[in-house]
Image: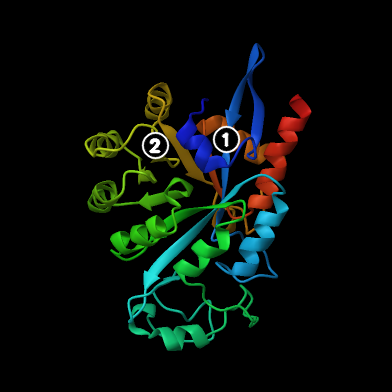
Amino acid sequence: MFTDRKFAAFLGPGFNYVFLFFMFCATGTVQAQVAIVGHRGGLYAPYPESSIKLFNATAASFGKDTVCIEIDLRKSKDGSLYLMHDPTVDRTTTGTGQLEERSDQYLNALRLKTKDGKITDEHIPSFDEVLTFISNRNINLMLDIKAPVHKEALEQVKRHNMENRMLVLTFKDEFTRLVAETNQNVLLSALIETEQAWKAFEQIPVRPGKRIAYITAKTPAELITRLRQQKVRIMADVSEDSKNGGKPLSADGYRTKVKNQQLDILISDFPTEAHHALGSQKRAAE
C-alpha cells in the first residue's frame, strides 16, 4: 500500500486518518492507509439516513480521524440539489412522489423518517447545506449523483472550495468522462469488474493520483493485483445491510475484507465499527 499528497488530502489533514497495520504473511507486515466511508452516513437506528444529525454523530465517533460520508444527490423541480437515495421521497420522508417533481417549498416542509418509520425533526438536507456543514468538520464526501446533474454539483463544490475533499462515484462511461471533463481536482471512481471496464476507464484523461477503481467480488484477482502494481487506488463496499443481516461484521471480518481485496477505501453501513476494527488492528501492531 502507498500514499501520496492528493490522497492524504482526502483522507484528512495531518495524520488524522486511520493508520492500519495488518499481516499479509508470516514474514512481514504491510502498512496501509485506509479511508472509511459511511454509506449514507451509516445505518444507525436512532437517526434517519442521510441526515445532518447522523453525519454529526458518525463524525464524532471518529474522534480526530476523518470519515468520508457517501451521499446521493437528486435535483428538485426548482433546480436545487438534495440528498435522497430513492427517486421518490416516500420511504424516507413524510411526503410522497418523485423528488424531481417536487418544489423546494414542498421538500423543505418534509421530515425524515428512521428505518423503522419513526418521524424525526430532521429535514431533507440540501447539498449546499451539507457543504457548509462539513466545512469545519472532519468529514469528506463521496458523491453518488443519481441524475445527470454532475456539472451543477461540481460547480457547488468549487464555490465552496472543497474539490480536494470530494470523491465522485460513476457507473457509466459517459458520466465518468463528464466528471473528468468538468473537474480534474476531485477524486474520480469507476466500477471495475472486467478488463474491458478498466481499459475504458484508462482511456479517460484523469490527473495522476485521482483515479479510483471501484471493485466487487466479480473483479478478477489478477486485475486487482495489476491495479495495485500500477498504484491505482482500490475501493470496495461491505454492504452489511443486505449481505450480513443488517449487522456489522466482526473486527476480523473488516480486516480480512481490506486484506483480501487490497483496499485503500472501505465503504461500510457501519463506519464506526469498521473504524474501531481497523483502529484496533493499528493499536495491536504498535
Q: Is residue 209 placed above or below 136 in the rendered structure?
A: above
Q: Position of residue 40 (x, y in %)?
A: 54, 61
- The residue under the point 66% across, 27% down is 21
Foreground disc of the pair 1, 2: 1
The reply, left or right, for residue 187 in relation to residue 61 is left
Q: Earlier in the sequence, mark 1 or mark 2?
A: 2
Q: Tag on residue 219?
A: 2
User: What's the amino acid at mark 1?
Assistant: Val
- The residue under the point 65% across, 14% down is 28
Q: How is the image coloured?
A: rainbow
User: What's the amino acid at mark 2?
Assistant: Thr
Whole-angstrom CA distance, mark 1 to mark 2, is: 15 Å
Pointer 1 local density, CA inside 10 Å: few below 14, some 14–19, many at least 20: many
Label 2: which secondary element:
loop
Q: Nearer the viewer, residue 78 or 34?
A: 78
Q: Is residue 243 placed above or below 255 in the rendered structure?
A: below
> Which residue was labeled with disc 1?
258
Residue 286 in sight from this viewpoint = yes
Label 1: which secondary element:
helix
- The residue under the point 65% across, 32% down is 19
- The residue under the point 58% across, 58% down is 241
Pointer 2 local density, CA inside 10 Å: few below 14, some 14–19, many at least 20: some
